[in-house]
Amino acid sequence: MSAGTLPNMDFKPGALRGFLDARFGKSGHFEIEKISGGQSNPTYFVTHGDRRMVLRKKPAGPILPGAHAIEREYRVISALYPADVPVPRPVLLHEDPELLGTPFYLMERVEGRVFEDCALPELAPEERRDIWMALADAMALMHSVRPEDVGLGDYGKPGNYFERQIGRWTKQWRQSESDPIPALDKLAEWLPANLPEDDGMVRLAHGDFRMGNMLFHPTEPRVVAILDWELSTLGHPLADLGFCVVPWHSTPDEYGGILGRDQGALGIPCESEFVTRYMEGAPDSAPLLPFHKAFALFRFAVIFVGIADRARAGSAVAENAADVGPLAERFAERALEIVEGRAHAC
């Protein structure tokens, strides 16, 4: 879509065009297209001359302190791009809100495929296993980078990651005006009582490492860009791994899981095969425990509570925000299945 008018935009395209003309030289070719989906930062495809970019900005209106931290996203991709971790090439960060109403950044647009459905219905069965294994490889590669080696040593608090995270998400859950969820309360008590001893491992934790946040090569089973770094911080790598195996513990109507599907017929690897592939690329990793998976589901559930709270307040970004509220209870129940030994094993 051209720069004339654009529905649901919170800034004037002409202001961005003028900025890019001044920065890169005047161009007669300018296009901007809003990318739908997501619960958070508005995102756009931007073409200026022969530059094909993606713009990420904070949403308009009041936001909580520290939320929608696009500056942190830009810092991460700027640090990881030279380290050969698959991220888009950073272009620029503009922190002055005067131009578009909020800070924003631009990164190079990478061509590839996005798979929202973990069952990968777009692919043939013989292709699906390789895509899942590529996901494990990309995560192991990301976790192979020591934060201090790429200028991210102060990107968060090192150590005691799970203890601090449990405290944070428990507090958010207890401050919510949501209806009671007994399973979530039970989980909030189980997790700190079963906290593994801190092994001192500190890596960059993506915070939302899942199939839908990966851009795969147009034809090859290879991740070419890890996207959406808004929740990233210094943390424990098993937090990402525990989150990434959630699809094996959730059904298709529970945020697109694969539980209950015939995974063998689909060509999807078992959870244990996926974890083994990750461990091959991360040989120093501690084993993945039920705790890590339960923590991931607990955190996911509280995030869904927050989205539902924002939907009730009328400030959610995504159109389906109100629909995800019931998932909080279902994910809490899935976590209890894991810690009580009732989870399905592949």
Image: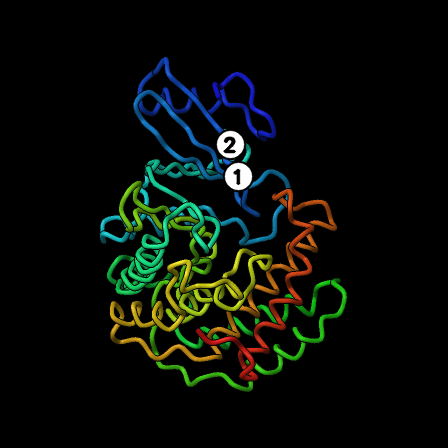
Pointer 1 or 2: first along the chain: 2
Instruction: Judge whether 287 appears above or below 88 on screen.
Output: below
- Please give the label number shown on residue 138: none
Q: Position of residue 216 (x, y in %)?
A: 33, 47
Classify the position of the C terminus by image quarter. bottom left
Does the CB distance between marks 1 and 2 fall below 8 Å? Answer: yes
Instruction: Judge whether 90 appears above or below 125 on screen.
Output: above
Query: Amino acid type of disc 2?
Result: Lys
Please identify, in this view, whether the residue under mark 1 or under mark 2 is nearer the observer: 2
Q: Is residue 194 left or right of residue 181?
A: left
| Farthest residue, direction front | 265
Q: Hey, which quadrant is residue 279 in on the image?
A: bottom left
Q: How many marks?
A: 2
| Residue at the (65%, 73%) spot, across then down | 184
Label 2 element class: strand
Look at mark 2 in the image and give the residue it sits on.
34
Query: Amino acid type of disc 1?
Result: Pro
Q: Hey, which quadrant is residue 107 in on the image?
A: top left
Q: Position of residue 160 (x, y in %)?
A: 44, 77
| Residue at the (49%, 19%) spot, across then down | 3
- Please give the label number shown on residue 42: 1
Instruction: Judge whether 11 appears above or below 261 on screen.
Output: above
| Farthest residue, direction top | 28
Residue 71, can we see it?
A: no
Q: Residues within 10 Å of mark 1 (few under 14, many from 20)?
A: many
Q: Viewer-proximal residue, 128 or 330?
A: 128
Label 1 element class: loop
Q: Position of residue 266 (x, y in %)?
A: 41, 58
